[in-house]
Amino acid sequence: MNWAFDSWSEFFAMGKHGLYVWSSYGVFFGLLILLVLVSYGQFKSWQKTELKRLQRLKLQKEHEQSVKKQQ
Amino acid sequence: MWNRFKTWFYQMSSPPHFFEKIKGWIKWSGFIGLTLLVVGIVWGLGIAPADYQQGNSFRIIYIHVPAAGAAMSAYIMLAIWGLIYLVWKIKMVDIFTQALIPFGAVLCAIALLTGGLWGIPTWGIAFVADARILSTALLLFLFIGLFLIRSQVQPLERAQKISSIVAIVGVVNIPVIKYSVEWVATLHQGATFTLTEKPKMPPEMYLPLLCTVLGVYFLMFAWTMIQARWICLQRDSGKRWVNQWLEAQSKEKSS
């Protein structure tokens, strides 16, 4: 098996079609990476707010218990 | 054997159980998928010979075909899951549906855009009012429609029902896409792979394509399952197992 191109510059030029080939691969990876990043960011922000809510609930419970003990 | 499958099936339809058990599957299919994709792309871009008619622009095939094929398969899965959800109301199936929709939409958009970029040097025009292109555009609108139904319609049960019905009805578009290159005169070239015939390309051209096609399928599975895990957490928020997971995660971070 041999490389289809003799040099890197030929590889990047892709004949006369470099623009189309490379922008296609850019679209492919760009959109997929964007989807992953956006979804990950949304999930992380959900996780953050949910953890905060959980900790607030815990503090509230502890506070209520300490009030009961004092009475 | 059947009984073991039945217990596995029942266990997997419980979100906390699925959440733990699917981890290994995600790791493996993600690893295999990425490897196949990288191998296929390096092979397709650097080693496969240029096409005698199209020159190097044909190398777009190594992402265009996997994206289009996986988008169509994703839609078929959505229709099947929609039917299963309407009949048996299995919660996990609906979680898979919600997990797959955005990925399917992105794949369909990639197929259209790379097709346009391939069309400019090959046909002299990016998009023509052609049966294959119009039906694929319709597929993209179906994906976007399903996404909007799920993000806008309240309550969740209503969104699930409507999106299942839309997915099932819209599946008639899939054979239209598939056979549009055979039924009507079109600029688009015929299928590279069919189950019954030998590929119309030499192996040094179609083997890298096979790699990227399989790679995208493996990655689609891995990503859908990753999303499904997140949706499991979000839908069960407030439940004990989710709270335990959240606390374990925050402890891991601080230590």
Image (cartoon, rainbow, N blue to C red):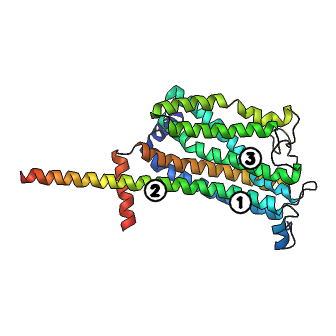
Residue corresponding to mark 2: A44
Q: What residue do we see at 17% from left, 54% from top? A: A63
Q: Pinpoint residue B150: horizontal percent, then vertical percent.
A: 52, 38
- Dot 1 lies on which element? helix
Q: Pinpoint residue B101: horizontal percent, then vertical percent.
A: 59, 42
Residue corresponding to mark 1: A26
Amino acid residing under circle 3: Leu
Q: What residue do we see at 72% from left, 40% from top? A: B137
- Dot 3 lies on which element? helix
Q: Chain of mark 1?
A: A
In three-dimensional space, the C-alpha distance between marks 1 and 2, rounded to whole angstroms, equals 26 Å
- Dot 2 lies on which element? helix
Residue B112 is labelled as: 3
**Nearer to me, B84 or A44:** A44
Q: Pinpoint residue B38: horizontal percent, then vertical percent.
A: 70, 61
- Above or below: residue B57 compared with residue A1: above
In three-dimensional space, the C-alpha distance between marks 2 and 3, rounded to whole angstroms, equals 31 Å
In three-dimensional space, the C-alpha distance between marks 3 and 1, rounded to whole angstroms, equals 14 Å
- Above or below: residue B218 compared with residue B184: below
Amino acid residing under circle 1: Gly
Crowding around mark 3 (Cα neighbors within 10 Å: few <14, some 14 to 19, many 20+) is many
Q: Chain of mark 2?
A: A
